[in-house]
Every structure is written in structure tokens, then in C-alpha cells.
Image (cartoon, rainbow, N blue to C red):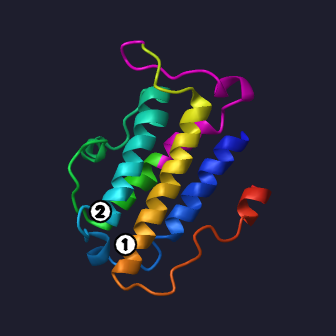
Amino acid sequence: MHQLVRHLQFAREKWLTGYEGLSDEDARRRLGDANAPSWMVGHLAYFEQLTWCQLAQGKTVEPTLERFGFGEPGTTPPLAEVMAAWEAVIPICDDYLVTLSDEDIGTYLKWSNGKPFWDDIGTTILRHTWHYWYHLGEMQALRSALGHQNLGPYIGSMRSLKNG
């Protein structure tokens, strides 16, 4: 598996730990203009699906994720609903991602009109990776503001990245 894909999978794994012990009630809370943690799940699933399912494979796994795209209004969906959508999308994304070679990393996915996607595949993987880290930090800050204690370490053990 390409090292960039391993890093994306590691970021997903660490992002998931940020949701451990989070109630649906708190996952649906917004503080000011901040996104609700449950919205973040749908948002990340939307971008994974757009890139690795729709553009790369011509598949739409969860059509309801469109409501979490860039610029869409912040909402407070049930955590179980969006987590189930995320869990349905990720294996389909990985079906594609695990096939990537060094040569593939510098190529571009294409929109339905034939125009190339914004960045090459390697840069797009990095964007997704950093997107997870951004929302993990945002979510942990919200949890802290809600009074949650003993939140896990931001990154924690990197054993799975080394041995993956």
C-alpha cells in the first residue's frame, strides 16, 4: 500500500478516537459558528465519497451526504446516522486507494465533464489527511468547551502507522 494512503488511514483512525465516549446530544451541539461534531462526520464522508467513490470509481454510496458539502449550511444530524454513512463509504474508498502505485500518485482524477480534479491524486490524499487532523482539533476543542475531561491524546501511539 502506498505510504500516503497509510497516512490517510492513520489520520482516520486517530480521528475516530476523538469520538469515543461522545454522546449523541453533545455530538449535535454547536457552539457559536463552530460545526457540530456530528456534522463533521458527514462532511468528511462527503469529501471521501466525492473523491474516491464518485470521481475515482463512478459510485455513489450514500446520496444523502450531499448536504455536507463545502458551503452547505451547518446542521446537527444524529451521530449514529452520519457515522453509519461514513462507515459505509470508507471501505469503498479504500477499495480504490489500496490499488494506487507511485505512478498513479501524480495523475489526476477527472470531473464528469473531463476536466481534471483540482489536484493530483497524491496531493488530494494529503488534503484529505490534513482535513481529518483539522476537524479532529476542532472537535476536541468543542468537547473541551463542553466540559469533557480526559480527552485522548491528539495523536497518541503511532504503532499502527509503523506496522501497517
User: Which badge, 2 or 1, comes first in the chain's sequence?
Assistant: 2
Which residue corresponds to the image point at 37% horizontal and 72% vertical from the top-left?
142
Q: Position of residue 138 (x, y in %)?
A: 42, 64
Which image quarter holds the C terminus?
Answer: bottom right
Which residue corresponds to the image point at 36% horizontal and 13% vertical from the top-left?
113
Q: Is residue 56 shown left or right of residue 34?
A: right
Q: What residue type is labelled 2?
A: Ala
Disc 2 + disc 1, Cβ < 8 Å: yes
Q: Is residue 135 shown left or right of residue 79?
A: right
Q: Is 3 placed above or below 133 here?
A: above
Q: Is residue 112 magenta?
A: yes
Q: Which segment is the magenta one? A: 90-114
Local packing at callout 1 (Cα closer than 10 Å; few below 14, some 14-19, many 20+) is many
Q: Which amino acid does label 1 sit on?
A: Leu
Which secondary structure, mark 1? Answer: helix
Which numbered marker is on residue 153?
none
Which numbered marker is on residue 34?
2
Q: Position of residue 15 (x, y in %)?
A: 52, 62
Which residue lies under the disc numbered 1? 142
Which image quarter holds the N terminus?
Answer: top right
Question: In the image shown, does 72 or 1 lie closer to the viewer?
Answer: 72
Q: Is 80 placed above or below 99 here?
A: below
Which residue corresponds to the image point at 58% horizontal and 34% vertical from the top-left?
123
Q: Where is residue 56 in the image (x, y as percent from the top left)?
A: 50, 28
Q: How far apart are marks 2 and 1 (CA)?
A: 8 Å
